[in-house]
C-alpha cells in the first residue's frame, strides 16, 4: 500500500492518493456492505457507479460468523474471489455500525465484545486474525475496545490499554499481505485519545483507524477529540513557545467510522481525515429519502424544492414517500447521471415505496451512493483549488438557511390552520 498527500487547504484538510493496489483519490467514501456487497445494490449495478470512487468497500468479518466457513473462504482464494470483486479494495473493519453496540460495562480482558448476527460474541485477537488470514482483505483494522461518550474515565483508560494490547497481538500474529491500520480510541476523554494516538503511531502500521465516534457525542464535543488525535499541543517546561505536531504522522492515511452526515464529513476532512466509513446512505435509503443537495456549493444557489416537512427537504434530501411525488415524472435530480435518474422517475419510486417493493431501495441506494460519491469528488476539487473552507461554510450556511425556512414554513402552516 502507498499513500501520498497531493494537496492541502485551510490547514489540515488534505487531498491524497491511496494505491492498494487500485488507485483511489482521497478524501474518499468507504461504501458500507453486508457480507462484502452493498445492502441493496446488485453486483451488476455496482459496476454502474463512478469508478474508481466506488471501488472502496467496507466489510465486517463478523458477518461471516454464520454461513460459509473460514476454510471455504480461504480455499476459494479469499473474499475477492468469493464475491467476484477482484478489482475492488476490500477493507475489514470489526465494527458493524448498523447493529453493533459497545459493551461499555464489559470487564473482559481477553477479547472484544460485539453484537453480531449470531448474538453478542467475544472475539479474541487470535480468532480475529484467523478471519483476516482467510479473507485476505487489502486493508484491515486491528481489534478495538470502543466505548460510548458517557463512559467513565476508568473505562476509557481500560479501553485504551486493551486496544493497544490487542494491536500488538494482531501485529505479532499477522501473516497476510494486507495493510494494517492501527485502532485509535479513547471515548470522550481528550487525554486518553491523545495518548492512544501517540502509542499507535509508534507501532509498525500502514495507517490509522479512528474509532469511538458516532457513539453519543455531539458535533461540538467531537472537535477537541479530533484535534487530540491529529494535533498534539506540547508545552515544554511552561516557558517555551507552543509547538504543534501531529499525533498521527502526515504520511499515513486516516480512516474514521461514525461520521456520516455531510456536515460531519466536512468536520472530519477539516481535521485531516482521509477515508470515511459510515452507514449514512443505508439509513437514508431505508427511510425512503433521496439526496438532492447541490454538489458545487461554492458557485451554486438552488431552490429546486420548497423547504417544508411535507417534502422532507431540508437542504440535503427529499422524502420520496410523500404524496406530492405521486405524479412527479421528473428524475430525482435533473442532471444526475446515475442509473436511477437516467431511467426512472420520482413517481415510480414513490409507487414502489408505498407498495413496499424492494426495488425502491435498490434504485434509491444507487442514486444516493452516486450522489454522495459526487459530494466527495466536490470536496477533493475544493481542496485542490485551496477553497475547502469556503466550500464548507457555503454548505453549512445553505443547510442552516433551509432548516430555518422549513421551520418558519411549518409555523405559518400551523397558524393558517388555527
Image: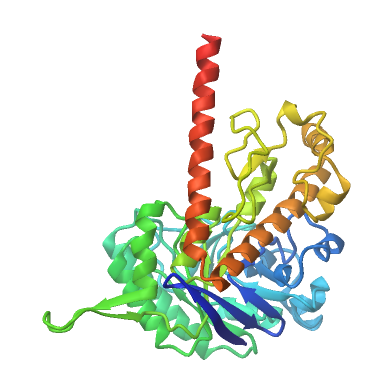
Q: Quadrant of the N terminus?
A: bottom right
Residue 159 is situated, as x and y percent measured from the top left of the image, at 37, 69
Q: Residue furthest front?
A: 299
Residue 261 is situated, as x and y percent measured from the top left of the image, at 54, 53
Instruction: Please give left or right for residue 375 compared with residue 395 in the image.
Output: right
Residue 83 is situated, as x and y percent measured from the top left of the image, at 80, 71
Colour scheme shown: rainbow
In front of the other: 298 or 191: 298
Instruction: Name the residue at 83% across, 58% down.
Output: 42
Q: Is residue 145 above or below residue 343?
A: below
Instruction: Name the residue at 53% across, 62% down.
Output: 114
In front of the other: 95 or 184: 184
Quadrant of res 118: bottom right
Q: Can I make out residue 189 in this image? A: yes
> Total label count?
0
Q: Is residue 116 above or below residue 134?
A: above
Quadrant of res 222: bottom left
Residue 302 is situated, as x and y percent measured from the top left of the image, at 63, 43
Q: Can I make out residue 217 in this image? A: no
Q: Is residue 200 above or below residue 67?
A: below
Instruction: Name the residue at 51% across, 37% down.
Output: 403
Quadrant of res 238: bottom left
Amino acid at each position: 500500500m502507498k499513500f501520498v498527500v497531493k494537496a492541502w487547504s485551510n490547514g489540515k484538510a488534505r487531498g491524497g492518493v491511496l494505491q492498494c493496489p487500485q488507485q483511489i483519490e482521497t478524501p474518499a467514501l468507504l461504501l458500507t456492505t453486508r457480507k462484502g456487497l452493498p445492502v441493496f445494490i446488485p453486483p451488476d449495478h455496482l459496476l454502474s457507479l463512478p469508478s474508481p470512487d466506488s471501488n472502496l468497500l467496507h466489510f465486517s468479518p463478523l458477518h461471516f460468523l454464520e454461513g460459509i466457513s473460514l476454510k471455504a473462504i480461504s480455499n476459494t482464494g479469499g473474499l475477492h474471489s468469493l464475491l467476484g470483486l477482484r478489482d475492488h479494495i476490500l477493507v475489514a473493519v470489526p465494527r458493524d455500525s448498523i447493529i453493533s453496540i459497545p459493551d461499555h460495562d464489559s470487564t473482559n480482558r481477553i477479547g472484544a465484545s460485539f453484537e453480531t448476527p449470531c448474538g453478542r460474541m467475544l472475539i479474541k485477537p487470535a480468532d480475529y486474525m484467523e478471519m483476516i488470514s482467510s479473507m485476505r482483505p487489502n486493508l484491515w483494522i486491528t481489534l478495538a475496545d470502543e466505548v460510548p461518550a458517557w463512559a467513565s474515565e476508568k473505562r476509557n483508560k481500560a479501553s485504551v490499554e486493551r486496544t493497544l494490547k490487542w494491536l500488538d497481538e494482531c501485529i505479532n500474529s499477522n501473516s497476510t499481505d494486507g495493510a494494517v491500520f492501527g485502532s485509535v480510541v479513547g471515548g470522550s476523554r481528550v487525554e486518553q485519545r491523545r495518548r492512544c494516538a501517540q502509542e499507535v503511531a509508534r507501532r509498525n502500521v500502514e495507517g490509522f483507524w479512528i474509532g469511538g465516534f458516532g457513539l453519543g457525542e455531539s458535533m461540538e464535543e467531537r472537535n477537541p477529540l479530533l484535534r487530540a488525535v491529529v494535533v498534539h499541543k506540547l508545552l515544554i517546561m511552561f516557558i517555551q513557545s507552543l509547538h504543534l505536531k501531529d499525533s498521527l504522522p502526515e504520511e499515513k492515511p486516516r480512516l474514521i467510522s461514525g461520521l456520516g452526515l455531510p456536515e460531519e464529513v466536512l468536520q472530519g476532512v477539516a481535521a485531516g481525515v482521509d477515508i470515511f466509513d459510515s452507514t449514512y446512505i443505508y439509513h437514508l435509503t431505508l427511510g425512503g429519502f433521496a439526496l438532492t443537495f447541490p454538489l458545487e456549493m461554492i458557485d451554486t444557489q438552488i431552490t429546486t424544492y420548497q423547504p417544508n416537512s411535507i417534502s422532507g427537504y431540508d437542504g440535503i434530501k427529499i422524502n420520496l414517500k410523500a404524496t406530492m411525488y405521486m405524479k412527479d415524472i421528473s428524475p430525482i435530480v435533473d442532471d444526475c447521471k446515475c442509473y436511477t435518474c437516467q431511467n426512472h422517475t420520482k413517481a415510480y419510486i414513490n409507487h414502489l415505496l408505498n407498495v413496499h417493493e424492494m426495488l425502491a431501495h435498490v434504485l434509491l441506494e444507487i442514486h444516493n451512493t452516486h450522489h454522495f460519491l459526487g459530494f466527495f469528488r466536490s470536496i477533493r476539487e475544493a481542496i485542490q483549488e485551496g477553497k475547502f473552507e469556503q466550500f464548507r461554510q457555503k454548505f453549512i450556511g445553505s443547510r442552516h438557511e433551509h432548516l430555518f425556512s422549513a421551520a418558519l414554513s411549518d409555523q405559518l402552516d400551523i397558524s393558517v390552520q388555527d
